[in-house]
Image (tube, grey):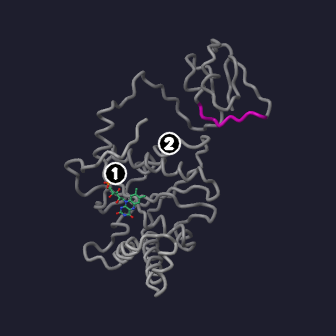
Amino acid sequence: MIEIDEAKCNGCNLCASVCIGGPIYKGPEVRDDGRIICVECGHCYAICPEDAITLTGFAGFKPHELAEKPPVDGPAMMALLRGRRSGRMYKPEPVSREHVQELIEAASLAPSAHNGHLTKAYVCYDEGTISRIRERTISYYRRLVWFFELPGFPLVWRLMGLDPEELEVLKYAFRGLWESDKNDDILLYGTKTLLTFTAPRRNAMALGDAWIAAQNAVNYAETIGVATCYNGFLIHAANHDKGLRKTMGIGGGEKVVAVLNLGYPRHRYRRAAPRRIMDTAWQ
Ligand SMILES: Cc1cc2nc3c(=O)[nH]c(=O)nc-3n(C[C@H](O)[C@H](O)[C@H](O)COP(=O)(O)O)c2cc1C
């Protein structure tokens, strides 16, 4: 809920101008006719030059004054983004709780539709559970490959309008989970720390929110020396195998949006990997 200290308010109306929901209008008045939605975005609080606005209901929130310029400049931010890599070679120890907590805080600061913040985080350190997650995921993909290899399946695949070559690529990738001769754990890479982000299954917009939240955590992780790697295999399997979701402690009402393998990197990347600038249409 918004509270305005009328003694401090100078009536500049910036709070009303920045408000998207409409509960504030013209100076120090809060319209409360039960029809207007405040999404608690806090823009009124953040913009007020007199610090006259309080948002109640944010236990533990520590005020944070902003300098005129962002604390990181363009070249530094671009260098961070350029240097970010998926990390798959970890030291044996798990990522500390303090570091995981920081990743979750970074994720919690991401934008979200209607300021909904419906993303939930699940942290798994338990080695037995991680091992069961691995087994269950691999057995899910074994079943899938068995299904793909049924005699009529390629025809069904083509009738679904899907590319036959992709079917071969998928079979090869899935088989690699148990047949790889390069590394015996190309699913989890020996991680001791799994961080999963979920969204309510029946809320279409919350899916995007969870992705963005996860990427906030990924970018922040670079700054504290934590390696991250999205785990697409696990994301897909968890959304199709109830038992796996149960092993991960995730309820049926939630969709698994992002899973990150975390670890302290065993090696450092020496240079940025080449990337193409995406196709862009300007008008
Ligand atoms: C949605 C998504 C799923 C991914 N799934 C996996 C995965 O299952 N296993 C893996 O090793 N890497 C996975 N990755 C990491 C990509 O392979 C990686 O981002 C890509 O090769 C580019 O490398 P970079 O992240 O260092 O730029 C995934 C990335 C994304 C965005």
Q: What's drawn in magenta, residue-wise? A: 35-42
Q: What residue lies at 60% left-to-right and 38% top-to-bottom?
A: 59
Q: Amino acid at mark 1?
A: Val
Q: Quarter-wise, where is residue 231 in the image?
A: bottom left
Most extreme residue toward the left is: 270
Of the residues under marks 2 and 1, which one precedes in the sequence? 2
For residue 91, which numbered disc appears in the image?
none
Residue 163, percent across and down? 42, 70
Q: Nearer the viewer, mark 2 or mark 1?
A: 2
Q: Quarter-wise, where is residue 78 in the image?
A: top left
29 lies above or below 177: above
Residue with the mark numbered 1: 226
For residue 110, which numbered disc appears in the image?
2
Residue 7, percent across and down? 67, 13
Residue 111, percent across and down? 52, 41
Residue 46, percent across and down? 55, 26
Give yes or no for contact between labels 2 and 1 (Cβ–Cβ under 8 Å).
no
Membership of 36 in magenta stretch: yes
Left or right: where does residue 111 sit relative to residue 13? Answer: left
